[in-house]
Image (cartoon, grey):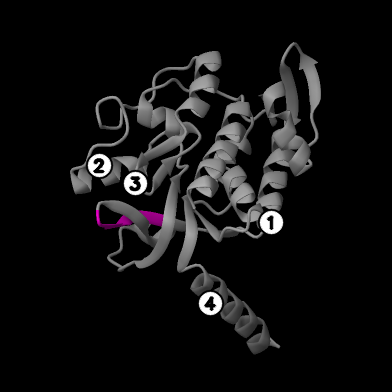
């Protein structure tokens, strides 16, 4: 039985990874925008894999606000919650409350049920860059990167890449720096996020969700970080709508 258990896991994991070596979309970061994008892309029949450095996908949603496990969404995002089966209740005006643990679990479940493949404990240390286009990821185990071990990576090829890494915009910075290219931003560089402004940030999160270099898209907080817009705090409607927007852009492109 011991051999059977190990054999089942090794064989199935190898098959999952091998099946994800050449895909339509590779997503870096398993926060809310990345998970929503994974759901809609998979639902549309696209082959999508999401790579998350932490043990549990979900990004900043798990902790709610300062570990109070409630978060806020606006009315405009409710159709996404309805489709994903997330419960919510009206607080007042345009603010709806959702339980952050329930919501995060629902996003992960919906994405994987739709057919998206999620690989946790992976780090992305570079991109595949060919013909002046981002066309894949260079991956390694997250513990390898944390320990600073010299272990060569593997590669994933993809028609499109979504950066959903959050505040740091690590993929956009890497692409600009290593390849000396200009991004689709005001000055061609990563501007960096500004201080908090909830209303402005919720609007610009969606506006800044776009293709910033051939093959490379940004969503969620990375979209605002790349374009120099504010952060928004524990309100997540813009993040969810950003995930839907980036998936829609890629579906139209593919």
Residue drawn at x 52%, y 28% is: 206
Residue carrying label 1: 114
Which residue range is magenta in the image?
123-131
Q: Secondary structure at mark 3?
A: loop
For the residue pair 219 and 63, the one nearer the viewer reads as: 219
Question: Where residue 14 is drawn, which disc sits there?
Answer: 4
Contact? badges 4 and 3 (CB < 8 Å): no
Is residue 126 found inside the magenta-colored segment of the image?
yes
Give percent across and percent down for residue 169: 38, 38
Q: State the mark number for residue 214.
A: 3
* Residue sitting at x 35%, y 45%: 171
Q: Earlier in the sequence, mark 4 or mark 3?
A: 4
The mark that comes first in sequence, 4 or 1, is 4
| Nearer to us: label 4 or label 3 | 3
Separation of residues labelled 2 and 4 (CA atoms): 33 Å
Q: What main secondary structure does the magenta stretch of the protein show? A: strand
Give the residue drawn at x 55%, y 23%.
233
35 in the magenta segment: no
Distance (Cα) linking label 4 and label 3: 30 Å
* Quarter of image, res 198: top right
Dot 1: few (<14), some (14–19), or many (≥20) neighbours within 10 Å?
some
Image quadrant occupied by the N terminus = bottom right
Q: Say the numbered circle drawn on residue 240.
A: none
203 to 11, vertically: above or below: above
């Amino acid at each position: 039985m011991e051999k059977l258990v190990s054999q089942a896991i090794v064989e199935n994991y190898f098959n999952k990874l091998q099946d994800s070596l050449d895909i339509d979309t590779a997503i870096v970061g398993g926060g809310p925008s990345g998970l929503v994008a994974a759901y809609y892309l998979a639902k549309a029949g696209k082959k999508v894999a999401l790579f998350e450095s932490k043990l549990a996908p979900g990004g900043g949603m798990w902790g709610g606000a300062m570990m109070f496990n409630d978060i806020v969404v606006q009315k405009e995002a409710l159709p996404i919650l309805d489709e994903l089966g997330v419960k919510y209740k009206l607080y007042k005006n345009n603010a709806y409350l959702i339980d952050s643990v329930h919501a995060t679990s629902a996003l992960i479940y919906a994405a994987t049920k739709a057919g998206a493949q999620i690989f946790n404990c992976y780090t992305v240390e570079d991109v595949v860059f060919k013909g002046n286009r981002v066309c894949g990821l260079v991956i390694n185990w997250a513990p390898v990167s944390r320990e600073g071990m010299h272990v060569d990576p593997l590669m994933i090829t993809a028609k499109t890449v979504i950066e959903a890494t959050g505040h740091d915009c690590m993929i956009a910075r890497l692409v600009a720096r290593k390849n000396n290219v200009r991004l689709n931003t005001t000055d061609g560089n990563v501007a960096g996020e500004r201080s908090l402004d909830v209303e402005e940030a919720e609007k610009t999160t969606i506006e800044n969700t776009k293709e910033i270099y051939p093959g490379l898209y940004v969503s969620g907080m990375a979209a605002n970080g790349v374009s120099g817009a504010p952060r928004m705090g524990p309100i997540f409607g813009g993040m969810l709508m950003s995930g839907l927007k980036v998936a829609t852009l890629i579906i139209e492109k593919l």
